[in-house]
């Protein structure tokens, strides 16, 4: 919190309460998967979760801050992708809990853990917004594919399916929609090109 707003801090009474389940501990769940297998999946999914939350928030930032002649279509597209990333966040978070783990949830922890570079608070121009989104998608896709292979090898088919069918497919489709904006399409096509 900034110094200017420090007088707003209220002493809170929760600090000494015992946690029901510490982060990093995987409790027994009768899904016929060893705790060691579920532990690996939970660790992987929490990394994917914080990166997906960061990508989700990057879309909302750009939805608000976009500018220029393509303002309206990008404003709508970025929000559509935000909604789809929000659904992935929920699916990944609930998968972690269903495996007996504890999901990362708060922005403080996301900021500490994410592999996606921090953007400035100020506005980027559209090509920079697009470059940041594509870079974030690449980070997510790269880790999701590696995690999907590991889940297949350890027998965690449900996690593998979530990673392949939902996370990878959604991110690949979003990359297509965003990356097409970088293709150079002249307004007057080819008429003046030498034969
Ligand atoms: Fe909006």
Image: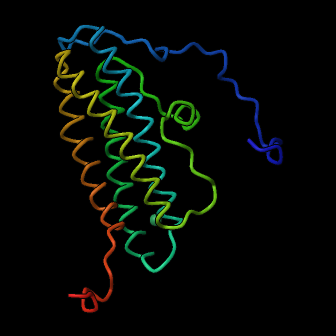
Residue 146's place in the image compared with 186, above or below, is: above
Residue 14's place in the image compared with 125, above or below, is: above
Which corner quadrant holds the N terminus?
top right
How many numbered dots are placed on residues in this image? 0
Residue 109's place in the image compared with 8, above or below, is: above
In the rendered image, residue 5, in percent from the top left (x then y), is placed at: 79, 46
Residue with the most extreme bottom position = 191
Residue with the most extreme front position = 195
Horizontally, is 118 left or right of 181 in the view?
Answer: right
Which corner quadrant holds the C terminus?
bottom left
Q: Which residue: 63% across, 60% down? A: 122
In the rendered image, residue 175, in percent from the top left (x then y), is placed at: 30, 54
Asked which colour scheme the image uses, the reply is rainbow
Residue 98's place in the image compared with 179, above or below, is: above
In the rendered image, residue 51, in percent from the top left (x then y), is placed at: 43, 38
Q: Which residue: 41% across, 29% down? A: 47
Query: Which is more toward the observer, 126 or 192?
Result: 192
Horizontally, is 49 left or right of 121 in the view?
Answer: left
Q: Which residue: 45% across, 75% down? A: 71
The image quarter in which residue 101 lies: top left
Q: Which residue: 34% across, 24% down? A: 97
In the rendered image, residue 186, in percent from the top left (x then y), is placed at: 32, 82
Query: Which is more toward the observer, 86 or 12?
Result: 86
């Amino acid at each position: 919190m900034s110094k200017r707003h420090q007088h707003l801090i209220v002493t809170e009474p929760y600090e000494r309460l015992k946690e029901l389940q510490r982060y990093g501990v995987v409790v027994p769940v009768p899904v016929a998967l060893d705790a060691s297998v579920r532990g690996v999946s939970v660790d992987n999914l929490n990394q994917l979760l914080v990166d997906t939350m960061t990508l989700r928030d990057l879309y909302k930032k750009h939805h608000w801050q976009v500018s220029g002649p393509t303002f309206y279509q990008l404003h709508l597209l970025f929000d559509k992708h935000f909604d789809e990333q929000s659904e992935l966040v929920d699916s990944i978070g609930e998968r972690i809990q269903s495996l007996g783990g504890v999901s990362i949830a708060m922005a403080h922890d996301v900021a500490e853990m994410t592999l996606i570079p921090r953007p400035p608070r100020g506005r980027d121009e559209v090509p920079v917004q697009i470059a940041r989104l594509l870079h974030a998608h690449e980070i997510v896709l790269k880790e999701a594919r590696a995690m999907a292979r590991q889940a297949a090898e350890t027998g965690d088919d449900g996690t593998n399916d979530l990673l392949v069918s939902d996370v990878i497919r959604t991110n690949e489709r979003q990359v297509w929609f965003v990356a097409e904006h970088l293709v150079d399409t002249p307004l007057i096509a080819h008429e003046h090109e030498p034969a």
